[in-house]
Image (tube, helix red, strand yellow):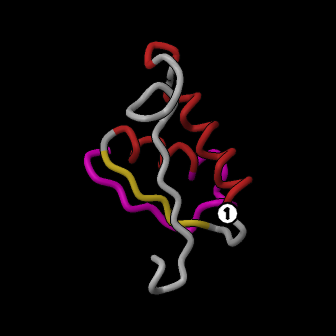
Amino acid sequence: CKRNQHTFVCADYYGVARSSGDFAAGTVSRWTADTIFLIERLITKSPVVLVGSGVGGWIGLLVASKRPDLVCGLVTMAA
């Protein structure tokens, strides 16, 4: 991304890995809303390409369906 001057954001979902919070309080709806919030606040050039596997792919699909103005592509695995 850096070599090609693309913005890249990688985040752990609430309650997962290095993020704060209790995993039991995390939901797909919350993680979807958090992802939309991050895109709106951190990305200066949109729409974006979302990349995710498993639940990350599922969240990407939900973000694209809720806010198609923010997303121009999806790369998902095992979503």
Residue, far top: 24
From the viewer's side, name the closer residue of 60 and 9: 9
Question: Residue 18 is drawn in which quadrant?
Answer: top left
Residue stretch rendered in magenta on the structure: 64-79
Question: Residue 5 is drawn in which quadrant?
Answer: bottom right
Q: Residue 30, position in %: x, y?
A: 58, 28
Task: Please give the residue where the numbered disc 1 appears in the rendered image.
Answer: 43
Q: Residue 55, position in %: x, y?
A: 37, 38
Identify the residue shown where x is 53% and y is 77%. Answer: 6
Q: Quadrant of the C terminus?
A: top left
In the picture shown, does residue 45 fall above or below 16? Answer: below
Residue, far bottom: 4
Residue type for callout 1: Ile
Q: Residue 57, position in %: x, y?
A: 39, 47
Identify the residue shown where x is 38% and y is 52%. Answer: 52
Q: Does 55 sit left or right of 60 as displayed?
A: left
From the viewer's side, name the closer residue of 61 and 5: 5
Q: Is residue 66 magenta?
A: yes
